[in-house]
Image (cartoon, grey):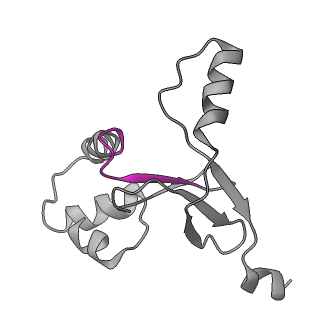
Amino acid sequence: MIELATAGADFTVDDLWQSLRQKEPRLGRATVYRSVEILVNAGLLDRIEFADGRHHYRICGERHHHHLTCTQCHRVVEVDICLPAEQFKAIGQQTGFAIEGHSITLFGRCARCTAHR
């Protein structure tokens, strides 16, 4: 995973599992899935959702951001756009929820895919 992280690449759990199995052939897929979930829940790894329901993972750092993914080529761009804190507070008050976090998923076609359409 360190190689994937330092390259800044997105990866799937299967990518990670195959990479790790080269060094530890007996490593189970379920172990890798559980470990990835722990890292996501700890905020050390970001889950990137695609329009087709697939997930990739990326180590992004600590700053708050969201992801915009291309529905055609699956390019991922980090965006620093978010709803204002007042809107989350208003949503919480309207619904009776104590909002603990959020995830905004954006999909579209990148400029290169739009041009080739």
Which quadrant holds residue 15? bottom left
In the image, residue 18 sits, relative to residue 66, either above or below, namely below
In the image, residue 25 sits, relative to residue 76, either above or below, namely above
**Picture coordinates of residue 116, whole percent (x, y):** 82, 88
**Picture coordinates of residue 102, whole percent (x, y):** 54, 37
Residue occupying the point 36% across, 44% down = 40
In the image, residue 110 sits, relative to residue 57, either above or below, namely below
Toward the viewer: 16 or 105?
Answer: 105
Residue occupying the point 53% across, 25% down = 99
Quarter that holds the N terminus: bottom left
Q: As drawn, is 45 to the left or to the right of 95?
A: left
Q: How many numbered circles does the render carry?
A: 0
- As drawn, which residue projects farthest toward the top? 96
**The magenta stretch spans which residues?**
40-49
Q: Residue 42 in magenta? A: yes
Which quadrant holds residue 103? top right
Q: As drawn, is 53 to the left or to the right of 108?
A: left
**Picture coordinates of residue 72, whole percent (x, y):** 72, 71
Quarter that holds the C terminus: bottom right
Residue occupying the point 60% across, 73% down = 75
Q: Residue 97 in magenta? A: no
**Picture coordinates of residue 69, whole percent (x, y):** 63, 64
- As drawn, which residue projects farthest toward the front? 86
In the image, residue 92 sits, relative to residue 88, either above or below, namely above
Q: As drawn, is 31 to the left or to the right of 53?
A: left
